Image: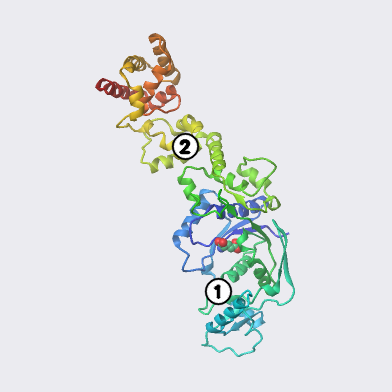
Amino acid sequence: MNKIKTRFSPSPTGYLHVGGARTALYSWLYSRHNKGEFVLRIEDTDLKRSTQEAIAAIMDGMNWLSLNWDEGPYYQTKRFERYHFVIDKMLTAGTAYRCYCSKPRLDHLREEQMARGEKPRYDGCCRDYVHNHIPNKPHVVRFRNPQQGSVIFEDQIRGLIEFNNLELDDLIIRRTDGSPTYNFCVVIDDWDMKITHVIRGEDHINNTPRQINILTALGAPIPAYAHVSMILGDDGKKLSKRHRAVSVMKYRDDGYLPEALLNYLVRLGWSHGDQEIFNREEMISYFSLDAINKSASVFNTNKLLWMNHHYINSLPAEYIAAHLAWHLEQQGIDTKIGPSLADLVKLLGKRCKTLKEIADSCRYFYQDFVAFNSDAAKKYLRPIARLPLEMVQAKLVAISDWTCDNVHQAIEATAKQLAIGLGKVCMPLRVAVTGTGKSPSVDATVHAIGQNRSLKRIDNALVYINKR
Ligand code: GLU
């Protein structure tokens, strides 16, 4: 059997959205599972809508998800010569013909068909009209679609699909301006690139019989087709910009890990028993097209958050720290002075579902704050907190070996000595060193903030109390 070869072939008219990313993932997985090859092809023939920014955004998304390709990126706009070569051959072979029908004639035809309640289609006027080519007369080139029989293909996800050839009119393959059309370029590319499995969105099902007919006319092998169902937002409508983040890179910005998004996307429409968590190797080894769901999938942000939380807490803290560093950089937080990012991940990972949340809540480890949160300060930095703060500060100053355990003992000894509950020491101390009423356990927090910084901040809290 031929080597399995799949492709992802986005039209660069916008960023890589989650639907496209899932299609890319399935194509990638299928090639990896079968030790085949994966091609990236940019379908940029729509010159008005394709942009360089979109091409870059798509590649950023693919790279962020580590969906690596073995061949490409190919650009359709660089292959026009090849398309024209095939079209000219088809004209000679008679599998394509020139159509000189004018726009007014076609408009009129369409209106009449619509008025009769028929589906508008070309009536084949130029099909059998043997005219000599009139060089300067505007014309298009049409594919001579079979008029009998039907096109049947076994969709790898949906089973047998049949289209009657009578429903397919003679597709334009070269426009009046000389440009080859989308469906034609796809066919030539899949053929030239030796694609064995076309995995794409269900919005392309109607293109498939046309593409199969052209491949047949060219004597080219017909790839297997798998059409993946669409993704709906949780309101049951097709996923779109209305549903928050749909661009893959927006998920990065929002603090998701690529591992979590990939795992979420693979499960969104594919399953392997009731397993939810898949690392890359597992995805590759279990993936199969027949376990892809036929029905539409519903995007569930809570489940994605759950997976992100899982990965934040199960991948090595050093690895998470590398991703977190990017977020801190975005927020302008310099992490040179302060705890190691890996320590922070261990400290905050359990409480946070996204890296952005971690980044948002860790500023006080690296930067001094200008003011205490007023609610927290009002509640906990009261005169009654002066003594516990002074006492714990004295004990913290005395620590020569700055460990979390020793910080813990300083707090505990203070509460004991003053015969007060631990909370009466911890809460003022927490507000003093973090500026807020919320943080991980106060001993670990004080320890991570560091001795000098903590002592200075307790000074500030005492000044605040004295001024009240
Ligand atoms: N360029 C098409 C799209 O972005 C995909 C075509 C295909 O996979 O055949 O929807």
Task: Work out whether 53 lies above or below 217.
Answer: above
Camera-side residue of 143 and 415 = 415
User: Is residue 147 among the parts visible in the rendering?
Assistant: yes
Camera-side residue of 328 and 427 = 427
Q: x, y (%) of residue 266?
A: 61, 47
Name the residue at 66% across, 81% down: 93
Camera-side residue of 216 and 421 = 421
Q: x, y (%) of residue 3?
A: 68, 58
**Is 44 left, or right, of 164 in this rendering?**
left
Q: Secondary structure at mark 1?
A: loop
**Is 148 left, or right, of 192 in this rendering?**
right
User: Is residue 401 among the parts visible in the rendering?
Assistant: no
Do callouts 2 and 1 mark residues in contact (Cβ within 8 Å)? no
Name the residue at 55% across, 45% down: 261
Task: Work out whether 113 lies above or below 6.
Answer: below
Q: x, y (%) of residue 94?
A: 66, 82
What residue is pinned by disc 1?
A: 180
Q: Quadrant of ligand 1?
A: bottom right
CA gap, disc 2 and disc 1: 49 Å
Q: Amino acid under label 2?
A: Ala
Camera-side residue of 207 and 405 = 207
Q: How many other residues sit within 10 Å of disc 1, few (<14), some (14-19) or many (≥20)?
A: many
> Dividing the image into 4 quarters, which one contains the C terminus?
top left
Q: Quadrant of residue 341?
A: top left
> Dividing the image into 4 quarters, which one contains the N terminus?
bottom right
Name the residue at 68% across, 72% down: 213
Task: Work out whether 104 lies above or below 165.
Answer: below
Q: Amino acid under label 1?
A: Pro
Q: From the Cβ of disc 2, is ligand 1 less than 8 Å away?
A: no
What residue is pinned by disc 2?
A: 321
